Amino acid sequence: QVQLVESGGGLVQIGGSLRLSCEASGRNSGIFAMGWYRQTPEKERDLVALIHWSGNTRYADAVRGRFAISREKVKDAVHLQMNTLRPEDTAIYYCKAQTPYGTVWGLGTQVTVSS
């Protein structure tokens, strides 16, 4: 069974940077894409960035040019480099993995951008 472990959240000032990481455990996971989503009490869980093992990436308009998703090729892990953070980036960030057997979610990590 695939499990996702997220790390890297925290408190940062406006304009600062954070790097989120997500690593999948479990043999023969079949993972072919991983991504990050975020959710606040006022909004649904929305896509932030996604990377397919083919190398294709997708970003939300709100983060394009500020965030960058990357993959570690030797293991099922992704990183999200977040720069020029804004108060509206404050949310719980969830890692998601897509496998032939279904979707797996992490427990989430809090990102808070303060002034």
Image (cartoon, rainbow, N blue to C red):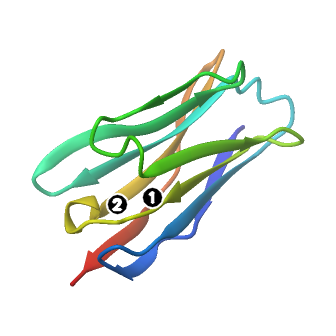
* Residue 75 in which image quadrant: top right
Outermost residue toward the left in this view: 42
In this rendering, the answer to whether 54 lies above or below 86 is above
Disc number placed over residue 34 in the picture, else none: none
Q: What element carries label 1?
A: loop
Q: Where in the figure is residue 25, as x and y percent of width and height? A: 77, 47
Q: Where in the figure is residue 16, as x and y percent of width and height? A: 41, 75
Circle nearer the N terminus (1, 2): 2
Disc number placed over residue 92 in the picture, else none: 2
Disc number placed over residue 108 in the picture, else none: 1
Q: As drawn, is 28 to the left or to the right of 44?
A: right
Quarter the N terminus occupies: top right
Outermost residue toward the front in this view: 65
**Mark-to-mark CA distance, 1 and 2:** 6 Å
Residue at screen point 57% across, 44% down: 69
Q: Tell me which amino acid carries mark 2.
A: Ile
Q: Tell me which amino acid carries mark 1.
A: Gly
Q: Nearer the viewer, residue 109 or 3?
A: 109
Give the class, few, some or many, for how many residues have Cα within 10 Å of label 1's Cα (few <14, many ≥20). many
Q: What element carries label 2?
A: strand
Q: How many marks?
A: 2
Quarter the C terminus occupies: bottom left
